[in-house]
Amino acid sequence: MGIGVFLLDFIAPYLEGMAPYVPGEFFPYFFTMKMFQRALLTAVMVTVVSGFLGTFLLIRNLSLIGDGLAHVSFGGVAVGIVIGATSPLSYALLFSVTAAILIYEMQSREMLTGDASIAIFLTGMLAFGLVVLRISGGGITLDIEAYLFGNLLLIDSSDLDMTAILCIGCLITLILIHPGLLATTVDPLAAQIQGIPVRAIGLLFSVVTAAIVVTMVQVVGTLLVTALLVTPAATAQLVARSFRSCLALTQFFGLTSVILGLYFSAELDTGSGSMIALVSAVLFAIVASFKVFEGLITPLRQEGN
């Protein structure tokens, strides 16, 4: 029994106990049926970890890296499917980690400026995946669409175990390196003078980012990773007053997006990944609109006083 299955068996009775109080005609199935419970647990685990990562990505100005590595992972998925691998996500992990390390090295050595390296990997590996699938004669099947747009209901026990291992490992790593990560983000030169291993932390952070992105592929798909990786953190930054409050609000907006997204996708019979992305964008739009309105009203109130 893997750790993911163990966690599912542990929380299943609690989910079943909550089912009678869950609204909707189809959404309660996420609390009673094993297949739907796997989907719910996976979505929650990925959302929690991606929330922590997304906050760090924003303050390091790396919001595009998640989208880039997600497209790279699609190239790995395509290779895995063509060669008949039992777990195409393992190939996605290999491709994404390799790309993350190369992108970090090119940026740290200033071989390319800005997000140019990310953009090249993004387009190149997506094209590579599509070409590999076309040459193999498979094309864009339903399984491929699940990796592009996300389909939680296709997650089996092995996928759940892999996701749980990656999420727990990445979360522990982020907690351990976050002091050094903050120091290298604020002032890399000062951090290096103080003896903080800037390059090692940067490489480890890149690997963690790649691993988390791979776990997100089956939740929202390679094309919609930003919906959970960046949007909740960006929404939180609009209203947070400290780094800690930003982390907490990111979790709130991320989990709200997932729960509402799964609810509406179940009741309206739409794709789970696209609905989660839509809810996340709507929450951002609501908060951003409120902040813009507040910014317009405040000067008028001051003038009135």
Image: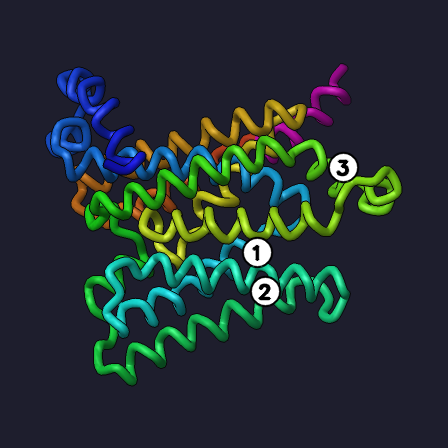
Gap in angstroms between the C-alphas marked 2 and 1: 7 Å
Q: Position of residue 72 (x, y in %)?
A: 46, 65
Q: Position of residue 107 (x, y in %)?
A: 71, 62
Q: Earlier in the sequence, mark 3 or mark 1?
A: 1
Q: Residue 183: which disc? A: 3
Helix or strand or loop: what does disc 1 sit on?
loop
Residue 290 magenta: no
Q: Residue 235: which disc? A: none
Magenta-tinted stretch: 291-305
Q: Identify which amino acid the numbered label 3 is placed on.
A: Ala
Helix or strand or loop: what does disc 2 sit on?
helix
Using the rendered image of the protein, determine whether residue 234 is visible from the camera's viewpoint. Answer: no
Q: Position of residue 261 (x, y in %)?
A: 30, 38
Q: Nearer the viewer, mark 3 or mark 1?
A: 3
Residue linked to disc 1:
64
Gap in angstroms between the C-alphas marked 3 and 2: 24 Å
The one of 54 and 192 positioned closer to us in this rendering: 192
Image side of residue 266 versus residue 131, left or right:
left
Quadrant for the N terminus, please: top left
Residue 137 position by quadrant: bottom left
Answer yes or no: do the residues labelled 3 and 1 have beta carbons within 8 Å? no
